[in-house]
């Protein structure tokens, strides 16, 4: 397979529903969930961490992660849309926008996926687990650092970055290869852009915020377990030393 569609839209712009829609249209799609939840993609997080620690604009063996996909949306693919355009020159570009604008995008992002930067329990996982360290490093450098320019703690700057990014994509992509899209527009513009038939079913409307918040709750629970195990281990070591020295 080769990428036919490059999603440039930020996470929290309807990318989960778009991901489901593209799969329904016969375009196997890549999304952050394919990195962290698909057991068949072992090693993908290491790949994206390498991307995050390479200079912007660097080319990589993208087929290592996209071999089984023809489209990508959401993070981390959107963070390298320029690089992917160079690697897959025949691909079209899909710029998803939050249906209610930049302010709503910011609120949604802060409420969900930005937890890796703000929730102290995730920092415990970064300290105690390889997954936490890898995911925290990748997301901090590639998503929040390189793509969002480190502005998420400042609402006005983040909103300005969102709006400026839209103009960057529009300026860089030939109009005939670009679809600026909101999921509230449904199947019609997406199918017309891709040249595929309209499905005889409603457009996916996935409640991804609740799904993400459940994942966050599970991560927090896991961090408490890891912290408890770490404290138990430290106490055991201290007790053994006390006994030995005594």
Image (cartoon, rainbow, N blue to C red):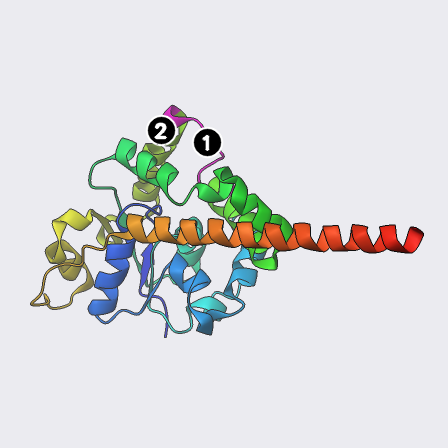
Count the labels in the image. Answer: 2
Q: Give residue 151's mark.
A: 1
Whether residue 54 is visible, yes or no, is: no
In this view, the residue in front, 13 or 219, is 219
The answer, for residue 67, to whether it is visible in the render is yes
At x 61%, y 51%, the residue is 228
Residue found 37% across the figure and 43% down from its top = 112
Q: Locate residue 103, reporting x and y percent.
A: 28, 31
- Binning the other alpha carbons within 10 Å of mark 1 as few (below 14), some (14 to 19) or many (20 upward) gives some
Q: Is residue 101 above or below residue 239?
A: above
Please determine whether, in this image, residue 124 is positioned above or below residue 62: above
- Residue drawn at (24%, 35%), measured in percent from left and top? 101
Task: Judge by depth and name the residue closer to the eye, 4 or 177.
Answer: 4
Contact, CB < 8 Å: mark 1 with mark 2? yes
Give the quadrant of residue 177: bottom left
Identify the secondary structure beneath mark 2: helix
Find residue 140 and name its label: none
Residue 39 vs 139, above or below: the answer is: below
In this view of the protein, which residue sits in the foreground, 32 or 160?
32
User: Which is nearer the N-term, disc 1 or disc 2?
Assistant: 1
* Residue highlighted by disc 2: 160
Q: Viewed as shown, does residue 233 lie left or right of 92?
A: right
Task: Tell me where the magenta segment starts and ends, as one range.
Answer: 145-156
* Residue 189 pos. (x, y %): 13, 54
Residue 153 located within the stretch drawn in magenta:
yes
Name the residue rendered at 51%, 70% in the picture: 42
Q: Badge 2, how many Cα within 10 Å: few under 14, some, many 20+?
A: some
Q: Is residue 191 above or below residue 100?
A: below
Instruction: Decide if residue 177 is on the left or right side of residue 138.
Output: left
Q: Is residue 155 inside the magenta stretch?
A: yes
């Amino acid at each position: 397979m080769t990428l036919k569609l490059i999603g440039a839209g930020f996470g929290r712009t309807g990318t989960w529903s778009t991901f489901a829609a593209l799969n329904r249209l016969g375009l196997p799609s890549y999304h952050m969930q394919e990195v962290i939840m698909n057991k068949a993609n072992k090693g993908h997080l290491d790949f994206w961490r390498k991307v995050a620690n390479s200079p912007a604009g660097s080319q990589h063996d993208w087929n290592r992660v996209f071999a089984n996909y023809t489209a990508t949306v959401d993070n981390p693919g959107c963070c390298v849309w320029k690089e992917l355009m160079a690697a897959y020159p025949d691909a079209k570009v899909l710029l998803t926008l939050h249906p209610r604008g930049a302010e709503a995008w910011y609120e949604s992002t802060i409420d969900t996926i930005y937890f890796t930067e703000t929730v102290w329990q995730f920092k415990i996982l970064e300290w105690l687990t390889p997954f936490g360290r890898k995911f925290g490093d990748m997301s901090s450098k590639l998503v929040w650092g390189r793509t969002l320019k480190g502005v998420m703690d400042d609402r006005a700057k983040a909103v300005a970055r969102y709006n400026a990014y839209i103009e960057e994509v529009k300026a860089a992509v030939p109009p005939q290869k670009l679809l600026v899209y909101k999921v509230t527009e449904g199947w019609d513009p997406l199918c017309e852009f891709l040249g595929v038939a309209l499905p005889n079913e409603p457009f996916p409307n996935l409640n991804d915020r609740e799904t993400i918040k459940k994942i966050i709750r599970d991560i927090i629970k896991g961090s408490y377990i890891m912290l408890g195990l770490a404290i138990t281990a430290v106490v055991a070591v201290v007790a053994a030393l006390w006994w030995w020295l005594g």
